[in-house]
Image: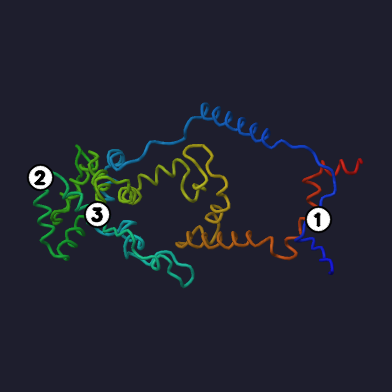
Amino acid sequence: MTKKAFRPDVDAPEWKGGYSPYDIIKEGTIALVVVALLTLLLAIVFGSPDEHAITIKTWSNAAPVDFATTALSELNGTSTTAQYGAPYNHGSTGPQLGPFTLAKWAGVRISVNTVNDFVIDPLKSQPSQPALSTALTQWSQASSSERAGWVADYTKAAGKMTFANGQVMVNSTNAGPVPVFIEDLTQMARSGALDQALITQAGFYTTNYTMPLLFLADGTYLSGLADHQHLTGDQWGMMNETGSYPGQAWLWLYTFWYQIPPFNTSANADVLVFAIMGLLSIGLLVTPFIPGLRSIPRKTRVYRLIWREHYQNQEKT
């Protein structure tokens, strides 16, 4: 029977050198204790970088005009959520990878109608109020063209919206029930009732915060806070914690692509970066099976640098 030829890229040669004792339990215990002490010490010195949660109540009290303007964008269909597309609605085709419309393949899985879900239904959950009840009835009995006309009239006048004496002020003349909707929704938000109404749409006991998070993201208040904390995409935000705290530094390779053309200006940046990282990950996985490439460590003799102490001892003996 012929002896099988030794393959340096695949077969490991038999070790014929000396051995040194190594207590892995001792080393592991020391490492665990040191890391635990360092973690405890750093936690005491620096504390937690977490900020208080931003709610719709927080937003509407800090920036009532921004909230009211965003509520109007949900009503007139110009908000980001209204135009997002899958998985929320059919507002757009969504991200594409070449000719492939990936979002449309997934379909609408979390149906969001911004007019009803963000404005009309929350207002219906309010205790009976004559003016609001009349406005809701007027809205429900109106045709689509009548509703569009009211919203267009209010939208035209909303460029000069102000907030004074606890009320939203817009000089509109033919907006139907829209002024009542925006005013009552703003008061509802400032009281905290809108947060609860948006959450409980999926049931009384729920942890689904999709609706309030989408509403918050449509305004400029949350993005302004993110910009101040250096958390936006053009600030390598995925790598940062709030303030000056470091975040997930291992994400640098992922966030790197968002900072360079064409990704930093592409509407399909997310799916393009996802595809590139997928290809790079596959390349990393198959590296040990690529002839020539897998031989680089052996041919460059980099192992002698890594285990230099061993080879120094070998040369002495």
Residue 117 circle label: 3
Identified by mark 2, the residue type is Gln
Instruction: Label 1, secondary structure: give it.
Output: loop
Instruction: Label 2, secondary structure: give it.
Output: loop
Residue found 65% across the figure and 36% down from its top: 28
Q: Quadrant of the C terminus?
A: top right
Q: Quadrant of the N terminus?
A: bottom right
The alpha-carbon separation of the residues under discs 1 and 3 comes to 67 Å
Residue 229's quadrant in the figure?
top left
In the picture as drawn, the residue positioned furthest to the bottom comes out as: 99
Q: Residues within 10 Å of mark 3 (few under 14, many from 20)?
A: some
Q: Residues within 10 Å of mark 1 (few under 14, many from 20)?
A: few
The residue wearing badge 2 is 129
Identified by mark 3, the residue type is Asp
Q: Position of residue 107 (x, y in %)?
A: 36, 65
In the image, residue 30 sits, relative to residue 96, either above or below, namely above
Closest to the observer: 14 or 94? 14
Q: Position of residue 207 (x, y in %)?
A: 32, 46
Q: Name the mark nearer the viewer: 2 or 3.
A: 3
Q: Residues within 10 Å of mark 2 (few under 14, many from 20)?
A: few
Residue found 32% across the figure and 64% down from its top: 91
Q: Mark 2 or mark 3, which has the lower sequence index?
A: 3
Q: Mark 1 or mark 2, which has the lower sequence index?
A: 1
Q: Name the mark nearer the viewer: 1 or 3.
A: 1
The residue wearing badge 1 is 13
Colour scheme of the picture: rainbow
